[in-house]
Image (spheres, helix red, strand yellow):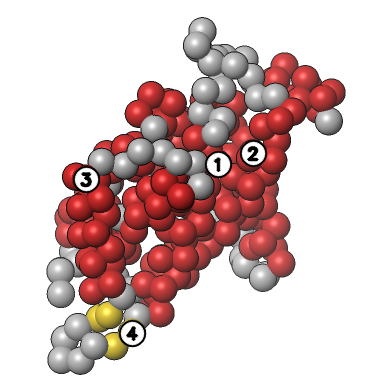
Amino acid sequence: MEWVLCWWQNIVFFKFDNECWLAKKDIPHAIIMVILDIIAPILLMYGVANTAATNVSLLNNFEIVTTSIIALLIFKEKISERLWLAILMVSLASVILEFEGNEALTFSKGSLFVIGACICWGIENNCTKNISDKSSMEIVLIKGIFSGIGSIIVAMLIKETIPNLIYILVIMLLGFIAYGLSINFYVMAQNDLGTAKTSAFYAIAPFLGVTFSFIILGEQLN
């Protein structure tokens, strides 16, 4: 296992002075991180297919709740009263959004998939926190390469068709910005701020998602 790490780290060519390379003891956290990063996006895609993008964006805030509770119960991270209040409000909003209104409360299957994705990411965020003092570039490469390979294998198993080349290129560009750069900055923030506080700041992302769904997709808030 150590020679695999050595070979891998010869490929990874950059780390900050205050960062270290991943060590053998970090491998379990990295494996769990990759597995959850395969499962969560699949659940999220099923959620997007079964509910409005605005709902998905707002429900993504439930990731803060799961991340913070796991950080408190398992990793004994301190959570302030203001953060507890935010967690309570997000939880209530998530319960409301699990039902799609109009004239009756109809349970949304898509919302359930999104909640499942948020739980996976909550666990994954805490695993990442345990190795956040290591090279953020190395962590992002592990997430991107191995989670991507795992997702491709799942897609092949369920007989998904290969999209047009132009879509592949656009998705790669989107992934570089929304996945690669995003996770790199997130890991660096976790090392400084802690898991719960980083997740709280990250809460602005779903509201930006709602805004873009208005502007780009023309969706309306029900």
Mark found first going from the N terminus, 1 or 2:
2
| Viewer-proximal residue among 15 and 156 | 15
Q: Quadrant of residue 159?
A: bottom right
Disc 2, SS: helix
Percent position (x, y) of residue 37? 56, 50
Could you tell me which secondary element the residue under label 4 belongs to? Answer: strand
Q: Earlier in the sequence, mark 4 or mark 1?
A: 4
Q: Which corner quadrant holds the N terminus?
A: top right
Q: CA distance from mark 4 to mark 3?
A: 32 Å
Q: Nearer the viewer, residue 24 or 167?
A: 24
Q: Residues within 10 Å of mark 1 (few under 14, many from 20)?
A: many
Please report whichever mark, 1 or 3, sits nearer to the chain's N-terminal start.
Answer: 3
Q: Which residue is mark 1?
A: 127
Do callouts 1 and 2 mark residues in contact (Cβ within 8 Å)? Answer: yes
- Residue drawn at (45%, 41%), measured in percent from left and top? 76
Q: Are marks 4 and 3 in contact (CB under 8 Å)?
A: no
The image shows residue 133 at horizontal and vertical percentages of 52, 23
Q: Nearer the viewer, mark 3 or mark 2?
A: 3
Residue bearing the label numbered 2: 30
Residue at x-position 39% and y-position 32%: 194
Marks 1 and 2, how far apart in space?
Answer: 7 Å
209 vs 195: above or below: below
Q: CA distance from mark 4 to mark 1?
A: 32 Å
The label on residue 68 is: none
Q: Amino acid at mark 3?
A: Glu
Q: Which residue is mark 4?
A: 107
Q: Quadrant of residue 21?
A: top right
| Sequence order check, earlier mark of 2 and 4 | 2
Say how many tags the image has.
4
